[in-house]
Amino acid sequence: MSTDNPLVATRVAAPVDPWAGVWIAEDIQLLYRGVKDGSWIEGTLGAVSAGLDALAFVSDPVGALLQYGIAWIIEHVKPLSEALDWLAGDAAQIAAHAQTWKNVAGALHDRVDDLDRAVRFDVSEWTGAAADAYRTWVEQQKGAIGGLAQGAETLGTITEAAGFLIAGVRMMVRDAIATLVSRLIVYAAELAATFGFAAPLVVEQVTTLCASWAARIARWLKDLISSLSKLRGIAGKVGELIEKLKELLGRLGRGGKGKSPGGKKPTKAAEQIKNGQEFKGRKLPQKGGPPDGTLYKRDPQTGDITNYTVYDHDGNAVKRVDLTGRDHGGVPTPHVVEYDRNVNPNTGEVFVREQRHVRPATPDEIP
């Protein structure tokens, strides 16, 4: 509906998200954003460290100066720093793990770019149903590999975020201990200056101070564990999505270059059919085919090959390639139907059935 009212905002089309349509990758991206925005960090760890120094200076400037000296001693006296390092772990190794995940993400992004260039330049003039099927297959590959890249980047960010949070809490604990010790030194000086007359007051102050800081440090450590537990849950979800992407890539890759069930390097479709046998029956069999061989069918009118099935060394169907005919599972021809093989543990009987997933045929599978 159009309007001349200058106060009415017009609709602005939102840009298409690069991950749109690939739901697994979209889920990974949402998890990545959740890690980056810090929503998993408990509130008490957010700004405590930033306000600690200012609080010390306002309430006790002399103690604050002592605090900095004690913090320096803790960092530079090895037994004291090692005790705190038990909390922080090996920062260099954490950084190395995070960088490794980011290197993996970079390599996977490069692979997506290679696939994109291959479609745009290497097969740009290839047309027809086979070309369309191949481009669809490549887009599926790009989506899955791009999702793996996002997953690797997310795991790197998770590792980095955990390291930063632990290091931050380590600094907070160090400064808290330094603050406590500096206050104790000041109280001891007060006690000496009054020749012990201030002992009741000093004892009460020391007891209150120690209890307060102990409770605060305990709360920080509790919230650190809680935050890391949330982060571990996110990492677990990312891992599950990565496994799904690996399964998807496995399904997309079957029938392409690789190893057949018999362990032989598969030949191209034309060679498989050339060395195969024509099948005169109505439907290509799922069992009882030529071991490590191929059966194919021809159109009785045109003589063109309509489909063929590849068999393993026991004569069980591995995959069927339909070159013509109707769509299967919403995938137009030429497409590939793969088979699962299950064995009855009691009788040893082999059952062969079609998988639900149907994929476009690759160029090697089209004669």
Image: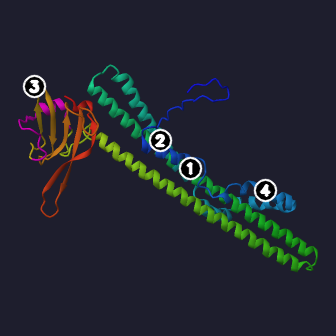
Q: Tell me the residue that label 2 is attached to.
A: 105
Q: Relative to 249, say whether 299 is above or below.
A: above
- Residues 153 and 2: in front is 2
- Residues 14 and 316: in front is 14
Q: Residue at x 66, y 56 (%)?
A: 168
In front: label 4 or label 3: 3
Q: Relative to 243, say whether 125 is above or below.
A: above
In front: label 1 or label 4: 1
Query: Considering the numbered disc 2 on the image, is that residue within a helix, a strand or a loop?
Result: helix
- Residues 16 and 41: in front is 16
Q: Relative to 261, say whether 299 is above or below.
A: above
Q: Which mark is residue 35?
A: 1
What amino acid type is highlighted by mark number 2?
Ala
Q: Quadrant of the C terminus?
A: top left
Q: Which mark is residue 53?
A: 4
In front: label 1 or label 3: 3
What's the magenta region? 266-287
Residue 109 location, x and y as percent?
A: 45, 36
Q: Which mark is residue 303?
A: 3
Q: Residue at x 41, y 48 (%)?
A: 242
